[in-house]
C-alpha cells in the first residue's frame, strides 16, 4: 500500500508539478544547475545523482504545497514524521502495519473531503454575495434592463430577422468572464464560432438571446440560478455570476 502511495506522489510530482514550475524553454537536465551553488555541485558525482536530487526537490515542493493547502483547511500534519515514513519505507523498517497505515490514510481522506466541502460551501456563499453586489451596480448602467428572472442585459446591436425560439439553431461568437474579470471561455481566441440549438444552452442564454436577432450583439449578466447554480463546472466556481458578450452570427429555425 505505502509503496503505491509513494509511487503516486512521485508520478504526481513529475506530471503535475515540474511542468508548472519550470519554463518549457529550460531543459530538465538544467533544473539543478540553475538552482545550485558551487558548494552543492561538488557533492554530486554524476548526472544521475543530480536528476535524483531534482526529483527529490520536486517531491518536497509538492509535499509543501499540499501541506499548505491542508493547513488552510485546518488539517496540520507533521513534516518530520512524513520524512521518517519515507525513510522507513525505503529501508523497509515500518513502525506501523500496512493495515493500520491503510486505515489512517482513509481517515485522512475523509478529513480532507470534509474540509473541502466546508471550504466549497463557504466559497459558494461568498460568490453569491459578491455576484449580487455586482449585479446591483451593473443594473445602474445606462440602457441595462432586468428581467423578472433576474437576468441583466444590454443590447449593443439588435440585429434583423425572426425572433429566436428554443428550436432555433444559433451560430455565435462569445466571451465569458467571471465578475472578477477572469476569463473562462472565449470562442474568439479559438478562432471559430460555435453552432448549437438554443434549447441546449444555459437558461440565461435561452432567455437573453431572444432579445436580439441575427447580426445582433448583447451583453448578458447571468445570476447563478440561470447558469450552473451552486455546482462547479469546467473551472467555474459554484454560485458564480457569469458575464457574456455574445454576437449572434446566424440563426436558422428548425423546420
Image (cartoon, rainbow, N blue to C red):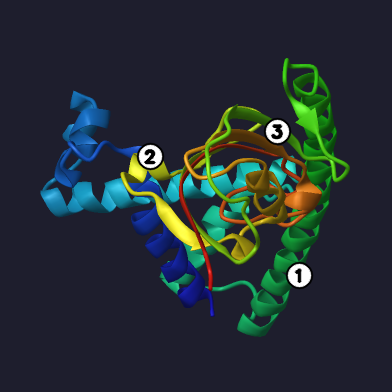
- CA gap between label 2 and label 3 equals 21 Å
The residue pinned by badge 2 equals 188
What residue is rendered at 83% in x and 52% in y?
Answer: 118
- Tag 2 or tag 1, which sits nearer the N-term? 1
Residue 80 position within the rendered picture, expressed as x and y whole percent measured from the top left: 59, 48
Dot 3 falls on a residue whose secondary structure is strand
Marks 1, 3: nearer the viewer: 3
Marks 1, 2: nearer the viewer: 2
- Tag 3 or tag 2, which sits nearer the N-term? 3
Residue 102 position within the rendered picture, expressed as x and y whole percent measured from the top left: 66, 78
The residue pinned by badge 1 equals 107
* Front residue of 255 and 99: 255
**Crowding at mark 1 (Cα within 10 Å: few <14, some 14-19, many 20+):** few
In the rendered structure, the answer to whether residue 192 lies left or right of residue 198 reads: left
What residue is rendered at 53% in x and 73% in y?
Answer: 255
- CA gap between label 1 and label 3 equals 48 Å
Work out which residue is located at the far right of the displayed protein and give it. 148
- CA gap between label 1 and label 2 equals 46 Å
Look at the image and tell me whether residue 60 can be seen: yes
- Tag 3 or tag 1, which sits nearer the N-term? 1
Quarter occupied by the N terminus = bottom right
Q: Are marks 1 and 3 in contact (CB under 8 Å)?
A: no
* Front residue of 58 and 144: 144
What residue is rendered at 18% in x and 43% in y?
Answer: 44
Dot 2 falls on a residue whose secondary structure is helix
Look at the image and tell me whether residue 120 can be seen: no
* Front residue of 88 and 222: 222
**Crowding at mark 2 (Cα within 10 Å: few <14, some 14-19, many 20+):** few
Q: Are marks 1 and 2 in contact (CB under 8 Å)?
A: no
Q: Which mark is residue 153?
A: 3
Amino acid at each position: 500500500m505505502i509503496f503505491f502511495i509513494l509511487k503516486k506522489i512521485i508520478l504526481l510530482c513529475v506530471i503535475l508539478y515540474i511542468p508548472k514550475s519550470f519554463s518549457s524553454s529550460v531543459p530538465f537536465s538544467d533544473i539543478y544547475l540553475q538552482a545550485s551553488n558551487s558548494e552543492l555541485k561538488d557533492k554530486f558525482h554524476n548526472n544521475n545523482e543530480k536528476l535524483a536530487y531534482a526529483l527529490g526537490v520536486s517531491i518536497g515542493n509538492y509535499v509543501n504545497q499540499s501541506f499548505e493547502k491542508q493547513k488552510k483547511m485546518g488539517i496540520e500534519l507533521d513534516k518530520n514524521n512524513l520524512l521518517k515514513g519515507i525513510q522507513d519505507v525505503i529501508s523497509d523498517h515500518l513502525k506501523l502495519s500496512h493495515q493500520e497505515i491503510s486505515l489512517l490514510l482513509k481517515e485522512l481522506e475523509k478529513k480532507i473531503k470534509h474540509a473541502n466541502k466546508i471550504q466549497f460551501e463557504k466559497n459558494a456563499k461568498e460568490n453569491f454575495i459578491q455576484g449580487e453586489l455586482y449585479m446591483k451596480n451593473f443594473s445602474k448602467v445606462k440602457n441595462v434592463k432586468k428581467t423578472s428572472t433576474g437576468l441583466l442585459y444590454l443590447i449593443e446591436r439588435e440585429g434583423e430577422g425572426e425572433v429566436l425560439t428554443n428550436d432555433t439553431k444559433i451560430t455565435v461568437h462569445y466571451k465569458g468572464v467571471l465578475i472578477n474579470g477572469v476569463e473562462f471561455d472565449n470562442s474568439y481566441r479559438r478562432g471559430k464560432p460555435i453552432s448549437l440549438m438554443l434549447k441546449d444552452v444555459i437558461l440565461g442564454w435561452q432567455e437573453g438571446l431572444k432579445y436580439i436577432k441575427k447580426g445582433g450583439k448583447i451583453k448578458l449578466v447571468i445570476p447563478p440560478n440561470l447558469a450552473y447554480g451552486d455546482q462547479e463546472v469546467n473551472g467555474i466556481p459554484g454560485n458564480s455570476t457569469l458575464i457574456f458578450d455574445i454576437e449572434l452570427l446566424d440563426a436558422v429555425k428548425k423546420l
